[in-house]
Image (tube, rainbow, N blue to C red):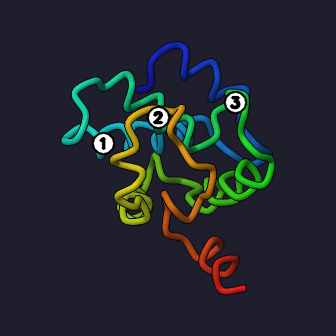
Amino acid sequence: MPSADIVSQIEKSLVDGERYRDFASMVDTLAALRSPYHDDYVLSERVGAFLLCVLFPDKPDSYTDEIRRFRVAFEGIADNPSTAARFANTVRPAALLVPTPEEIYWDAPLYFSHETFERRMRR
């Protein structure tokens, strides 16, 4: 379960049809995947939250829109191990290695592999 400050931000960041449990599961998964590369779990959780567009300022609208569509594609992740595994398999090395939220480059396909992004990249 994400830390208290992340929990309150997730609740404010949900889009129609999105469940808190699913969003929180994605943040937890990202933080866990980052743990072999970073000692500070709280910072890894924060980076994951930023990448998944928890409402923190200074993200381009285009990135936020793409990530919201991406999150909705993993509806049910909190209850379905197959969906959780599919999500984990979308995480690219850049999402694991970016050290701080301030060093995120706001281009979704750098951090996640998903057909929504792949179509954009082929244009």
Name the quadrant of the C terminus. bottom right
Query: Residue 75, position in %: x, y?
Result: 59, 55
- The image quadrant that residue 121 belongs to is bottom right
How far apart are labels 1 and 3 at the CA level?
21 Å
Q: If you read the primary sequence from the N terminus, does the residue marked by circle 1 or circle 3 appear first?
A: 1
Q: Report the residue marked by disc 1.
A: 34
Name the quadrant of the N terminus. top left
Instruction: Give the crowd class for mark 3: few <14, some 14-19, many >=20 residues within 10 Å.
Output: some
Q: Nearer the viewer, residue 116 or 61?
A: 61
Q: Residue 89 has which mark?
A: none
Query: Residue 100, position in %: x, y?
Result: 44, 32
Q: Report the residue marked by disc 3.
A: 55
Q: If you read the primary sequence from the N terminus, does the residue marked by circle 1 or circle 2 appear first?
A: 1
* Residue 81 seen from this side: no
Q: Identity of the amino acid at label 2?
A: Val
Taking the spot 30% from the left edge, 42% from the top edge, the residue there is: 34
Query: Residue 122, position in %: x, y?
Result: 65, 86
How far apart are labels 2 and 3 at the CA level?
12 Å
Instruction: Give the crowd class for mark 2: few <14, some 14-19, many >=20 residues within 10 Å.
Output: many
Would you say the residues marked 1 and 2 are in contact, meaning their CB atoms lie under 8 Å apart? yes
Q: Identity of the amino acid at label 1?
A: Arg
- The answer to whether 86 is drawn above or below residue 32 in the figure is below
- SS for dot 2: helix
* Left or right: where 71 falls relative to 48: right
* Residue 63 seen from this side: yes
Q: Identity of the amino acid at label 3?
A: Leu
Q: If you read the primary sequence from the N terminus, does the residue marked by circle 2 or circle 3 appear first?
A: 2
